Image (cartoon, rainbow, N blue to C red):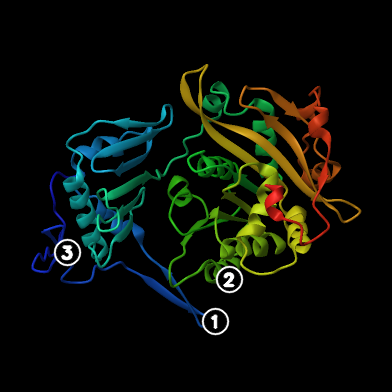
Amino acid sequence: MDEGMNLQGINYNVSNTVPINDRQEPVIETSEPIEDNTVVQTNDNLIVENANYLHNDNLFSNIDFGPLQKYLTDDNITDISYSNGGQVWIKTLDKGVYRTDETEINDALIEKIAFQCSNVMGKTFNMAHPFLDSESAELRMNFVHDSIARNGIAAVFRKTPAKIRLEKEKILKEHYVNINIHDFLIRAVEGHCNIIVSGETGSGKTELVKYLAAHTKENEKIITIEDTLELHLDRIFPHRDIVAMKTNNIASYSDVLVTCMRQNPKWILLSEVRSAEAVTAVRNSISSGHNILSTIHADKAESIPHRMYSLLETNIDVDQFLKTIYRYVQLGVNVRGRYDMQEKRFKREICEVTEFYVDENNEAKHNTIYRKTVNGQETYKQPSKYLKEYLEGQGVVIDDLFIGKGIDEVNSVNKSIPNTANQEIEDLF
């Protein structure tokens, strides 16, 4: 990135000021609107806006990040957090989260970066507008003004590189996954299983979805639907038939999904299920015969259907909703990130793989095929006949991957969902 500021066409107007704590800050505005090459389509009286984010990324490339720049260009670093009047916290792939001392990274620098971002976006950042979200092609930034963050301006920088960090040899060597479960998940993708990846923030859910998506067939069209750009599959695989859609305050998940269906995709990738609208989008996608890969915040794989239900804002029947998810979502995968005391490093790993199905008695059940404890103990259970039959119908066989695997009796019990709709959902987490 260029040193210093060189935002062409941007007018730094410092005539408007807002007093804060006996000082004044510039309210920076653009003299002319920034052209974004927006393409607008009308469809059934709905407006779908497809912003050209690469144009804005060219403007973001001129931002002067100063001493923060070295952290942004380090591939090992995923997140940077600034808070509390000068604290800089770094999240890396190998060490996890730790604090670094950088006296040159201070409130003044973060404010400068925030004002530059506000100029690129044609927005203001002050007491009247104390929150600022900005997004380039591979970087997401969030700022909280010190009129709200009373111990100093706060900021988070999250890197979303257009690359797949997971590589087979590396993840096997680092015990992210063993070869049997790795090959099982790849065959599940080849067999068009609907898969939802769960885990906490920073556990690597999106990276796993990108890795699985890389194993879809080249002639299968992919449409990604995101509210913040993270997957970048269109840039990773520029030769493939991929459409990247971004929701906003004009085009909601529901609006985009209507157009998405008309684009005739084989795979629909939702970056994260975190709203009622996203849950509805998942349900409509899978029930219409499309395949999905997505992520969700949940503490274990078997909780995914109930977590989806908790996000709904309607009084839809519990059993009816859960049976739809159990019937059409074949697999849930849970990933976690933790500091390994033996290896003396932060590591991410697949710790649970659970299948969902509805049996011949119309009961929704889950079956935990694989579980790995924090001390490394692995337990297996044979996949159900329903999953095997589904994959065999797609020309995929998995029996060889589970030959000779010991079965933990505690984990061998299939659990049915409650028949009473009013039973406490929270108890199932």
Q: Give, as a three-letter code, the residue at label 2.
A: Val
Q: Tags 2 and 1 in contact by the CB under 8 Å rule?
A: yes
Residue 17 placement: quadrant: bottom left
The single residue placed furthest to the top in the displayed view is 342
Kindly state the secondary structure of the residue where label 3 is placed: loop
Q: Give, as a three-letter code, the residue at label 1.
A: Asp
Task: Measure the alpha-carbon separation of dots 3 and 2.
Answer: 38 Å
Q: Is residue 426 left or right of residue 61?
A: right
Residue 429 in picture, x, y percent from top left: 67, 47
Dot placed on the residue nearer the N-terminal end, 3 or 2:
3
Mark 1, residues whose alpha carbon is within 10 Å: few (<14), some, or many (≥20)? few
Q: Is residue 267 visible?
A: yes
Kindly state the secondary structure of the residue where label 1 is placed: loop
Nearer-the-camera pick, 247 or 163: 247
Residue drawn at point x = 18 percent, y = 72 percent: 32
In the rendered structure, find residue 11 and report the number of the disc placed on it: none
Q: Is residue 107 left or right of residue 388?
A: left
In the rendered structure, find residue 28 and report the number of the disc placed on it: 3
In the rendered structure, find residue 44 and report the number of the disc placed on it: 1
Residue 210 in picture, x, y percent from top left: 53, 44
Dot placed on the residue nearer the N-terminal end, 3 or 1:
3
Q: Give, as a three-letter code, the residue at label 3.
A: Ile
Residue 209 placement: quadrant: top right
Task: Name the residue beneath numbered marker 2.
Answer: 258
Q: Is residue 401 above or below residue 67?
A: above
